Image: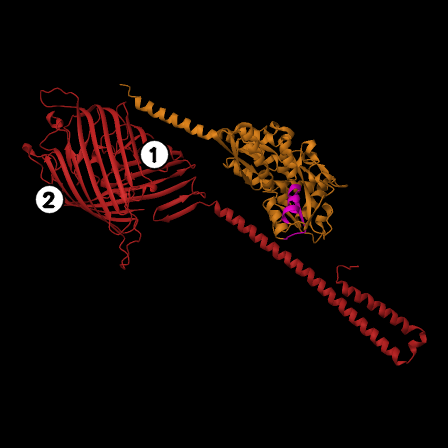
Chain colours: A red, B orange
Amino acid sequence: MQIGGEDPNVTKFRIFSWIGLGMAAVFALTPAAMAQSKDPQVADLLKRINELERKVNELEGVKQKTDNLDQQTKALDQQVRVIDRRQELQQEEQHEFVSKLPVVEAGQDGFWLRSPDKKSYSLHIGGYFQGDGRFYTSQAPTTGAASTNPSAASTFLLRRARPYFEGTVAKYFDYKFMLDFGQGQSTLQDAYGDIHYIDEARLRFGKFKEPVGLERLQDDRYLTFVERGYPTELVPDRDLGLQFWGQLFEKQIEYQAGVFNGTPDNVANVDSDNNNPKDFAGRIFVHPFNASFGEYVKGLGLGVAGTYGNERGNTIDTYKSEFQNQVFAYNTGTVASGNRYRIAPQFNYYWNSLGLFGEFVQNRQSLSGPFGPGKKSVGAPISNYAWQIYTSYVLTGEEATYTGVKPRHDFDFSGNSWGAWEIAARLEDLEIDRDAFKLGLANPNYNVREAFTWVVGVNWYLNRNVKLMTDYAYTQFSGGAPKGSDRHAESGFLNELQLQW
Amino acid sequence: MNHNRPILKLFGLILMLALLIGARANAEQTLLNVSYDPTREFYTDFNKAFAAYWKAKTGQDVTINQSHAGSGKQARAVIDGLDADVVTLALAYDIDQIADKAHLLPVDWQSRLPDNSTPYTSTIVLVVRKGNPKAIKDWNDLIKPGVAVIAPNPKTSGGARWAFLAAWGAAVRAPGGNEDSARAYVTKLYQNVPVLDSGARGSTTTFAERGIGDVLLSWENEAYLILNQLGQGNFEIVYPSASILCEPPVAVVDRVASRHGTSEVARAYLEYLYSPEGQEIVARNYYRPRLESVRSKFVGSTHSISLFTLKDVFGDWKKAQTKFFADNGVFDQIYVPK
């Protein structure tokens, strides 16, 4: 029998104790006279019964306490478990709450605000500015028509000051807005949206770089030289349009194909079109050798880009030297008057610290204009050419890439690390169609027929956010001065301090 | 010269790529089934069978992804954008919310499949520890002093709402029972609840794995899972004299399925629940099948229990939700968080 769950042995002891006491009582009380007897045995028996009774009571008390303790222990155990479980649930709730909070990041890559899944919504606030110093070692050059334009001078200038914000909404829609306040202007450089459900096929719309020049497409922050080369003079900069683009076969092939308003070469602040025809621009760029072909060849990229359109009545292009001085402009009244196409084969190659880059552009545009007194204004196709080739090498061992050099260790004043250092050298050439002068579309007294430049440069990447650049450029001109002589050479140092975030 | 030629070429290219992407999408289909907490094992079993059936029938591969959590939470997730092709939730009210607030399926969704779109049913039972040390036999034993009851939160868990209504309904239908006595009963009942999990599976963890409480208010299927998987021989099921017939519904989320191009396979997926094969899987996973011929295969079919429906006691889910579980409803009034 189990009483209230007590220990069976205690129970047995209790039972036998009571039986024993009972028997002892019977023996003690019968005959009744024995209760009065002074027999010492009886007295002893009584004494022992009392003692047994006392012990049983004691044991019962102990058992009661043990039972109580047992119940208290179980209750405490449950309370502890309940507390633990509530804490566990609270932590789960907190974890769920935190997992729904937006993610804020601030670091080398700028300032980011992202949705908890880090994919669906994001905002990146970034920017960069480039403070330049241009110092001539040659005679101060003229710019444009000598009679009307003052000589260019050595100068400091804010080359670019570009805040931007970009990000993603609703997981599949990217956006970017970028302004420029450099050189005393306010320009909307980029304003576009990207729809991308898959990497292989995306749609971009708005204002953005046309997919033509390889160096033009390179981000300003990652340029190897302070200024882009001559081919960039002959290709479009930003334009408004619609572009289909993507990356195939694990980014071995990139393609872009778009329709745009059609802007003059190298101009970014034309925000509308004044004629109906539109330009078609397309580019394909391949990395034909992936890693399985070996380290030496996987860094090769080859491509070709081009545009085709029909421009009428638009203003046309002017071209600048390495120091951004105008070296060629068509006569006032010369306008686009027909088909225009550009073709731009291009390549780059990167292997460890070594970089190699080259592109060629032919720009052919029908023009018409005041061909001179007594001459008819007729359309004529004018073809201009430019090419560049350069090499770079990162002395501190970091990788050379199209998207810049990332120093392994930041520069610190204690001398433990010097950041990353890079040297580079470039050859480039710009050639104007002779017909432009023969047909009277450009004045040979002020405008060069050809510009050939060599540049050497040193870049110091203090960290991923700060870069110092120094280039020495020397340009030899053909034509561009009165009486058929050559404009005098232009040389000097181009320096730039870039800060980006 | 046709100056629009570049535009036409570009649109042609876009169209071609769109066709290629579409063709790629049709080769394999993926469904997301957003379900409530305790159906994990059931749908693991069911999805395998359906995938094989669909492949044999159409030659098409289908992958079914599952999402499980408290029914109320799941409904809110779908309203907020979780792309469910089908929902298989604990109660019709949660799917009604998806129809009303997000307009992802029509308001008459429940009439589109047999038995009010409930291919299987369940009920609420009591799970106790081995030997039933607190001698729990029926609802009244749950409010005795010293009895700790484990139940999930009716504000977040569909099963908890069924449990609450089962308790209330049993109290109202008891001899001499009325609204006041039912309210008094549930007040005492929830005073005996030391931990309120957000979902049925959480309550199972609290009771069976953390060793808290004397009795668990549980879905019937979950109770059998506890017996067979979480602690063989450590628990017992007690069938109360009366409980509620739980009718967890299923529905295709039309606008999502249409966007994904999965409408046909989603419909077939839910229809397969009603098939003999589907009903066998239902019974095997401790749910009460609708198909008469399979009912005897359900392990709980031998237990005698009087089942009342939601309609019998409360009318409909909208009334029950408003009265008991909405903000400042009966549950908010009687439950004091510990």
- The image quarter in which residue B37 lies: top right
Residue A19 image position (x, y, % from top left): 85, 67
**Residue A208 versus residue B278: which sits nearer the camera?**
B278
Residue at label 1?
A192
Residue B208 image position (x, y, % from top left): 63, 50
Which quadrant does the N terminus of chain B fall into? top left
Q: Is residue A118 left or right of residue A20?
A: left
**Residue B287 versus residue A34: which sits nearer the camera?**
B287
- Label annotation for residue A500: none
- Boundaries of the magenta span: B211-230
Identify the amino acid type marked 2. Answer: Ser
Q: If you read the primary sequence from the N terminus, does the residue marked by circle 1 or circle 2 appear first?
A: 2
| Residues beneath discs 1 and 2 located on the same chain | yes
SS of the residue under disc 2: loop
Identify the amino acid type marked 1. Answer: Tyr
Chain under numbered label 1: A
Crowdedness of circle 1 by 10 Å Cα count: few (<14), some, many (20+)?
some
The reply to whether residue B319 is visible in this rendering is: no
- The image quarter in which residue A444 lies: top left
Crowdedness of circle 2 by 10 Å Cα count: few (<14), some, many (20+)?
few
SS of the residue under disc 1: strand
**Residue A53 versus residue B120: which sits nearer the camera?**
B120
Residue at label 2?
A138
The reply to whether residue A435 is visible in this rendering is: yes
**Residue name at image x 86 percent, y 76 percent:** A45
Q: Are marks 1 and 2 in contact (CB under 8 Å)?
A: no
Q: Is residue A60 left or right of residue B32?
A: right
Chain under numbered label 2: A
Residue A34 image position (x, y, % from top left): 92, 76
